[in-house]
Amino acid sequence: MTMADSSTEPDWAAIRSQFPFLETSAYFDIGRKAALPSAAKAAADAWFEDVYGTGGANAFSMDGQEQTRQVVSDTFGAPRDNIALIKNTSEGIGAIACGFPFEPGDNVIISEHEHENNTFQWLHARERGIDVRYAKPDADGCVRPDAYVDLIDNRTRIIGVAWVAYGNGYRADMVSLSNLCRAHGIKLVVDAIQAIGVIDQRVDALGADAVVSGGHKAQFSVTGAGFMYLTQEMIELVRPPIAAKYSFESIDRHVPDPVLRSDARRFEYGNPNFLGLAIQRASADFVRRIGLANIEARVRALTTTLIDALEKQQFKVLTPRPWHERAGIVAFEVPGDAAKLEMKLREDGIRTAHKDGHMRCAVHFYNSYDDIDRLMAGLSRYAHHD
């Protein structure tokens, strides 16, 4: 496989060949789960070989956790001590919602377009006397920064927002949201699962207090192997809702008053997902070698072509056209039943998703322009003949 350097265009056909599933399928569903590269299988095979060959001398070593932390740090941009290796977005946001020092009467603001992984944790916090407020979308269906302003008062503690909305693919204006939060002393918590691995942006440069993401989308990890970035202030502010030996400075259980770690590892508990970490490490390195700048440029070109094609066939595109307001997701309305259309396309080897009554195509660098032609042909066959 030919990877990129700073001066050459990646060999996208060679990179695509590392995804065996794509030999027969046009896969536009990384917004749900990733089609995995062969590097992920190689990592899993090597892990099992060590388990069978040595009883897991390396496979079950905690050194692998630190190696994964370093690769994630290098690839996605954050100091390693500010990264917790967690299962998924729900776990990370849940830890913040449960461990943040709320007082009764405080409030949290989220949007009406948040995924369940950035909704239920805050609703659960209502048991502690927390109010949950909802920012509403504008006429274009996007929840822009102005939607949060009138909901803020002196008891607003957190704004929780998706960097890229799972439904219509709107990319939030992180600069404006960060400035808004700083001006009011509010913490900004970001669900980044639809953005990390697509957008060429360091997570520690978003202006967020916490950035949380499962790994099973554009990181090409597996379920159960994601990460969470927190600023040092946020690490110290949030008390882990549960704790185990690796949450503390010492693993000596006889220490009378164990002290929580001062870094993000305080949110890690006991034995990690060793197999998941091995795959996460290999896949993060795979992304690093391609380069996020190359990935973003490729996704931008492919999604622009897809939007043009959809509009040419008179589909109403719900995703904003300006690149700074979108990423890899392109959502559009279809006549009839979107769920039924999804299944018809799947029968033809075209993987999409239906979300909130519309179609969602999540494009990534491994897609080709032939994939887009194949999708459009499928839509011509089925979309207007429900």
Image (spheres, rainbow, N blue to C red):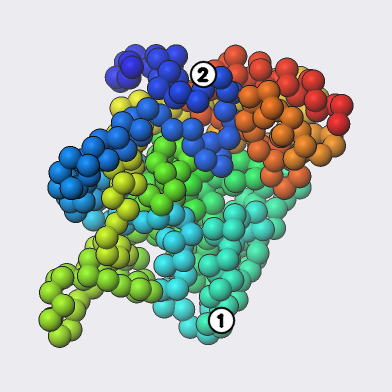
Q: Residue 287, position in %: x, y?
A: 36, 32
Does residue 250 appear left or right of residue 41 in this picture? left
| Label 1 vs label 2, nearer the camera | 2
Earlier in the chain: of badge 1 and badge 2, it is: 2
Quadrant for residue 170, please give it.
top right
- Three-letter amino acid code of the residue under disc 2: Glu
Q: Compare residues 282 and 308 and report the one nearer the observer.
A: 282
- In the image, residue 198 above or below residue 145: above
Q: Is residue 377 visible?
A: yes
User: Viewer-proximal residue, 384 or 288?
Assistant: 384
Hey, which residue is sitting farthest front in the picture? 52
Q: Residue at x 29, y 19 (%)?
A: 5
Query: Around disc 1, counting alpha carbons within 10 Å, would you say few (fewer than 14), some (14 to 19), or many (20 or more)?
Result: few
Residue bearing the label numbered 2: 23
Does residue 253 lie above or below 327 as drawn? below
Q: Secondary structure at mark 2?
A: helix
- Please state, as top left, top right, bottom left or bottom right, where the C terminus lies in the image: top right
Residue placed at 57% from the left, 28% from the top? Answer: 27
- Write the residue at 68% across / 23% down: 348
Give how far across and how far down residue 246 sits, in percent.
22, 66
- What residue do we see at 73% from left, 21% from top? 378
Q: Give SS at disc 1.
A: helix
> How far apart, in angstroms, are the residues tagged by discs 1 and 2?
50 Å
Question: Which is nearer the eye, 325 or 256?
Answer: 256
- On residue 127, which mark appears? 1
* Image position of 256 (left or right of 153): left
